[in-house]
Image: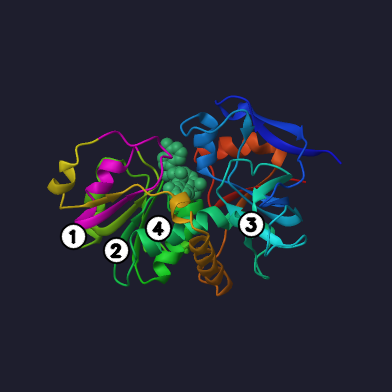
């Protein structure tokens, strides 16, 4: 049987993704071969495909998928063929029907989480886990600002922050996205605002004080306005670049704006140790299984139709998670 994967030979627009026949070798020592049933699409795939983030070329693309272990290499313990698994991160190459993965990056899926849910959840949900539970631990009564609140990360972040007892303020671009954000835990949604107008609106909603933390995955367009939405000693979490990378700035600004904290975190550092990955996944799966988190798979495409999936995500036409179906 011929297997197919999406390959990149150069960086560029969505059209550089090529759907090609591939030969997947037997898993090397420490690896497991995974037959993938659903693949997650993430904004990081766009950064890597466009060249904003460097990846080795020619090569694969994609960071997240769920499927079944078909074979394991020498030295792999704790996984056997037939196990249902998922992963987020590692070498790009998730846009594939089948691939080899380092076995220590795979997490067993609990009964009750299907492949599509897992592919929509792993990377975005683990991100939300560390952002809300480790980067800045959200506490009851906190006011938090979440940009792109109806997006893949956004919908999960709003639900989880609300469940932790926070007052969630979200930003979105359209009334349809606003309704979705509201249905997923946002108490206040700011719709279609120019970034310059954001601080005054956020202060009006927080008795003039500002929020304790901003989760900003939009980047260039919102960074400065986000700083102005924070209460003194607030935490700016700049975790993405959907509108482009943040421009260099003078650290003294953080003092002027209230002795603010700033971090630019990445999931891949938070999950680098396997014990952390497993603990994070355990908590994430528990929140899905106890109903705290609903996973919204809004868009499904064939793997061979990944160009359309990228175009729609980049053009802000999606909500929730997008997945690719390999077969
Ligand atoms: P989303 O589903 O959130 O899509 C991005 C959203 O960003 C859009 O829907 C749009 O929402 C908003 N946006 C604002 N300006 C722009 C713009 N100029 N172009 C495109 N989108 C824009 O994507 P993901 O859930 O996959 O990722 C969200 C963010 O989280 C990304 O920045 C991603 O890189 C980051 N991320 C970071 C991780 C980390 O560990 N650091 C890990 C995972 C994700 P609207 O129209 O409502 O404004």
Q: Residue at x 30, y 33 (%)?
A: 247
Discs 4, 2 touching: Cβ within 8 Å: no
Q: Considering the numbered disc 3 on the image, is that residue within a helix, a strand or a loop? A: strand
Are the residues at dot 2 and dot 1 in contact (C-beta closer than 8 Å)?
yes
**Alpha carbon separation for disc pair 3 and 2:** 33 Å
| Marking on residue 131 | 4
Q: Residues within 10 Å of mark 2 (few under 14, many from 20)?
A: many
Residue 2, x across and y down, in percent:
83, 38
Return the mark for residue 143. 2
Disc with the residue nearer the chain's start (3 vs 2): 3
Residue pointed to by mark 1: 209
Mark-to-mark CA distance, 1 and 4: 22 Å
Ranked by sequence position, the earlier of labels 4 and 2 is 4
The N terminus - image quarter: top right
Determine whether, in the image, residue 239 is placed left or right of residue 111. left
- For disc 3, the marked residue is 86
Query: Which circle's residue, 3 or 4, is located before the other in the chain?
Result: 3
- Residue at point 65% right, 38% down? 306
Mark 2 or mark 1: whose residue is earlier in sequence: 2
Name the one closer to the observer, 170 or 93.
Answer: 93
* Closer-to-camera residue (192/101): 101
Name the residue: 38% across, 62% down.
134
Residue 211: image location, x then y, percent: 26, 59
Q: Position of residue 65 (x, y in %)?
A: 64, 51
Is the CB–ligand 1 distance for label 4 below 8 Å? yes
Part of the protein shown in magenta: 220-248
**Extreme residue in the front direction:** 75
How many other residues sit within 10 Å of disc 4, few (<14), some (14-19) or many (≥20)? Answer: many
What secondary structure is marked by label 2? strand
- Above or below residue 24? Residue 29 is below
Frontmost of labels 4 and 2 is 4
Q: How far is the residue under mark 1 from the one under mark 3? A: 42 Å
């Amino acid at each position: 049987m011929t297997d197919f994967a999406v390959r990149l030979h150069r960086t560029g627009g969505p059209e550089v993704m090529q759907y090609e026949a591939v030969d997947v070798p037997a898993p090397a020592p420490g690896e497991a071969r995974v037959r993938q049933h659903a693949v997650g699409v993430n904004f990081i795939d766009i950064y890597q495909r466009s060249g904003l983030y460097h990846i080795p070329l020619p090569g694969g693309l994609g960071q997240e998928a769920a499927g079944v272990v078909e074979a394991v290499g020498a030295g792999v313990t704790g996984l056997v063929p037939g196990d249902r698994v998922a992963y987020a991160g590692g070498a790009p190459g998730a846009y594939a029907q089948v691939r080899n993965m380092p076995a220590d990056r795979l997490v067993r899926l609990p009964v009750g989480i299907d492949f599509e849910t897992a592919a929509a959840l792993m990377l975005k949900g683990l991100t939300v886990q560390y952002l809300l539970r480790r980067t800045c631990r959200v506490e009851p009564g906190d006011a938090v600002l979440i940009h792109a609140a109806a997006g893949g990360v956004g919908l999960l972040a709003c639900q989880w922050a609300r469940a932790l007892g926070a007052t969630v303020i979200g930003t979105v671009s359209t009334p349809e996205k606003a309704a979705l954000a509201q249905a997923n835990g946002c108490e206040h949604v700011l719709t279609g605002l120019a970034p310059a107008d954001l601080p005054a609106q956020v202060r009006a909603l927080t008795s003039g004080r500002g929020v304790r933390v901003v989760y900003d995955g939009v980047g260039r367009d919102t960074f400065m306005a986000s700083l102005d939405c924070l209460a003194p000693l607030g935490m700016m979490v700049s975790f993405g670049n959907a509108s482009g990378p943040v421009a260099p700035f003078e650290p003294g600004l953080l003092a002027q704006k209230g002795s603010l904290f700033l971090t630019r975190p990445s999931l891949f550092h938070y999950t680098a140790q396997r014990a952390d990955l497993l603990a994070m996944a355990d908590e994430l799966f528990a929140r899905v299984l106890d109903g705290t988190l609903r996973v919204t798979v809004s868009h499904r495409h064939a793997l061979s139709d990944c160009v359309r999936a990228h175009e729609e995500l980049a053009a802000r036409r999606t909500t929730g998670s997008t997945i690719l179906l390999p077969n």
